[in-house]
Amino acid sequence: MANETQASSYYQATANRNISTQALGGDVAADVVVIGAGYTGLSAALELAKAGFKVVVLEAQTVGFGASGRNGGQICTGFSPGQSRLEAQLSKADAKRCFDMAEESKRLIETRIAEHEIDCDLTWGYLHCIPKPHQFSDLQKWAAEYEALGYGGNTLLTKAELEGKLGTAIYHGALRESHAGHLHPLNYCLGLAAAALQAGVEIFEHSAVIDVDTGPSPKARTANGTVSAKFMVIAGNAYLGRLVKPLYGRIMPVGSYIVATEPLGENRAKSLIANNEAVANTNFIVDYFRRSADHRLLFGGRASYSTMEPANLAEYMQPRMTAVFPQLKDVKVDFAWGGFIAITSNRLPDCGRLSPTVYYAHGYSGQGVALSGLYGKLLAEAIRGQAERFDLFAKIKHFPFPGGALRTPLLVAAMTYYRIRDVLS
């Protein structure tokens, strides 16, 4: 399994808040019980508490233990498969509404950071880099699609122009977004938790839910207590496991890995990424990287469907990093960690109701830093009786992943196919 501690995480080592709450003990009543103290659950809890609801959050480990505290920190635009996948299921007008809400998710991040004084190194600017020359036409189509959606501030960069921004020659051009970027994901999550606590939310850490009643009167049971509520929000994402049987096959946990170098010094860090953008290549199995506030390089990728973490993550990831930046072969890796993100079969987030009182959202497919906060807000809107926006996303159809003994082998085979495709494209 991917590393289930954060002892080697750069984010844990540089956390600037200490959120520590007790475990649930005894029976508690609430208006809403939320399962999971990541971005989705905390976002929903914060919105509901501000509206006067009594909210209890149950977290199996600690705040931000899952993907919300482990991810690459990259704030992306839209949805992983692009607009065409949305337009295949919704009208073009409704697909545009979905894109506009995805853009709202970025503004929501900015608003919450400002309102709650969350120190999380928010930085705007994003480079999508192509590994092969012929892919420049794909960037042109991508830029044209953004223009048609009214999303401006994007620039196409030639290979020569890109080499003036990155300290590598392996890419052949890029699309630069000025309205996507990066942040310190765990500090952002801890900031949301602090805001939720201040708003009156009760958060119980080390309170794994072992059984749920998803009927008209929802109930969540832990080893040491229960929470009875009028509504339930299920926000466990890749860490939900088999707790809620109807949701098990709808998402797949995917391992993703990140390393952080030793501090490089400001000048050397700038020589790698001159303007401090977030960077990713355009392969199906992406490499992504960025600078940290203390002048390290954070380099991630190498997604795995097997759920088996390599024995030595630093040795596993370092060749990927030095293939992009050969000048870092002498650099020490200080931190290496992994965790799960959740994907859906069509790479669009999955949300809906299990009953009139039980809501869920998960499966952000690599774009959860922004989208999970939006979906948390939409969950809160729906519980408050304003479900139009939530219901638009709930209309999207999702096919379950194959189950049983073939589930993981089939996806490992699929990953091998996409690795070959990336090489040969």
Image (cartoon, grey):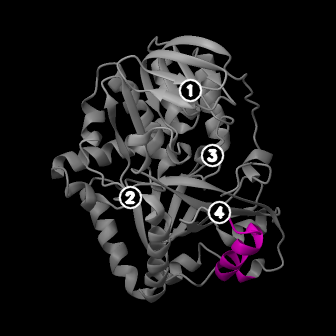
Question: Which quadrant of the figure has residue 12?
Answer: top right
Marks 4 and 1, how far apart in space? 32 Å
Q: Main secondary structure of the magenta part?
A: helix
Is residue 284 shown left or right of residue 295? left
Q: Which quadrant of the rendered structure holds the N terminus? A: bottom right
Residue 241, how many percent across, how many down?
A: 53, 45
Q: Residue at x 34, y 59 (%)?
A: 346
Q: Give the answer, above or below, for where 381 lies relative to 425.
A: above
Judged from the image, the secondary structure of the residue bearing numbered disc 2 is loop
Q: Residue beneath label 3, please?
A: 185
Marks 2 and 3, how far apart in space? 28 Å
Q: Nearer the viewer, residue 394 or 297?
A: 394
Q: Residue beneath label 4, please?
A: 257
Q: Residue at x 55, y 19 (%)?
A: 56
Judged from the image, the secondary structure of the residue bearing numbered disc 4 is strand
Question: Which quadrant of the figure has residue 399?
Answer: bottom left
Q: Residue at x 35, y 40 (%)?
A: 351
Q: Residues within 10 Å of mark 1 (few under 14, many from 20)?
A: few
Which stretch did the figure color magenta? 308-326
- Disc 4 or 1, which lies upstream in sequence? 1
Q: Residues within 10 Å of mark 4 (few under 14, many from 20)?
A: many
Of badges 1 and 3, the one in the foreground is 3
Residue 401 got which mark? 2
Of badges 4 and 2, the one in the foreground is 2
Q: Residue at x 60, y 53 (%)?
A: 71
- Disc 1 or 3, which lies upstream in sequence? 1
Residue 390, how many percent across, how many down?
A: 30, 34
Q: Residue beneath label 1, please?
A: 115
Is residue 417 shown left or right of residue 82? right
